[in-house]
Amino acid sequence: MGHSGRRLTKGANARSGFWLIPVQDEEGECRETATEILASWLNTGRWGMIERTRHREHIQPGDRVCFYVGKVGAIVAHAIVRGPADTPVTSENWPERCPLPDYRVYEVPLEPLEGLDFRLERRVPLDRSLRARLEICRGKSIDRYWSWLVRSPLDISRHDFVLLVGQEPDE
């Protein structure tokens, strides 16, 4: 079971969910910041996930996703998923400045959510006060050792998603 209480199943049985997706800098010969990478993908209305990304096959049309950039320390964008992450990305439609890697990458079709239009300038810091309000952090350390929260795509509750995109939940 995912945190939101829905069973993680493939295909038509999956229900809409909420996801926190971390974005990392590209290291090595071709350097690109996480914000640059995210902007290049979102400007095409897509996000890319490598084949072995945890929960990739569970992210389904209708799900909401929010993107966390570690070096910024904040949620910087959110969107609604339009299709499954099952279309391989080719060199012709690769949006990043760095070249397409040797491993398989799948695109996740997206559309803006609630008028945000993928604006990266609106940031919601994932600071201690916000972590203290998240259901997924209850009973866990929020001061130290909270990197598990932003290590890979994470199935979260609607309550947590609403907070992470800078709104107040209906309680």
Image (cartoon, rainbow, N blue to C red):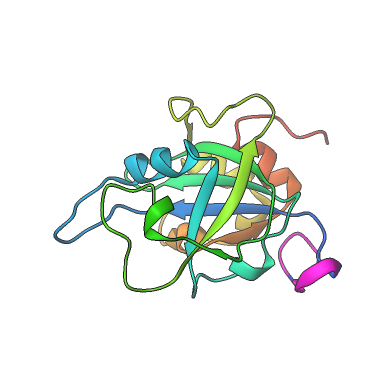
> Magenta stretch containing residue 9, yes or no?
yes
Q: Residue at x 17, y 61 (%)?
A: 28
Farthest residue, direction front: 92
Give the number of callouts.
0
- In this view, the residue in front, 62 or 70, is 62
Taking 99 as reference, is 76 above or below it? Answer: above
**How far across and how far down the image is residue 120, in percent?**
45, 30
Q: Residue at x 27, y 47 (%)?
A: 97
Q: Residue at x 81, y 65 (%)?
A: 14
User: In the image, is 57 to the left or to the right of 146?
Assistant: right
**How far across and how far down the image is residue 105, in percent?**
45, 65
Taking 124 as reference, is 105 above or below it? Answer: below
User: In the image, is 135 to the left or to the right of 123?
Assistant: right
Q: Residue at x 64, y 38 (%)?
A: 111
**How far across and how far down the image is residue 83, in percent?**
69, 54
Which contiguous range is marked in magenta?
Answer: 2-12
Q: Assign the C terminus to one quadrant of the image.
A: top right
Res. 7 visible in picture = no
Instruction: Residue 113: name its quadrant.
Output: top right
- In this view, the residue in front, 137 or 96, is 96
User: In the image, is 97 to the left or to the right of 11?
Assistant: left
**How far across and how far down the image is residue 89, in percent?**
47, 60
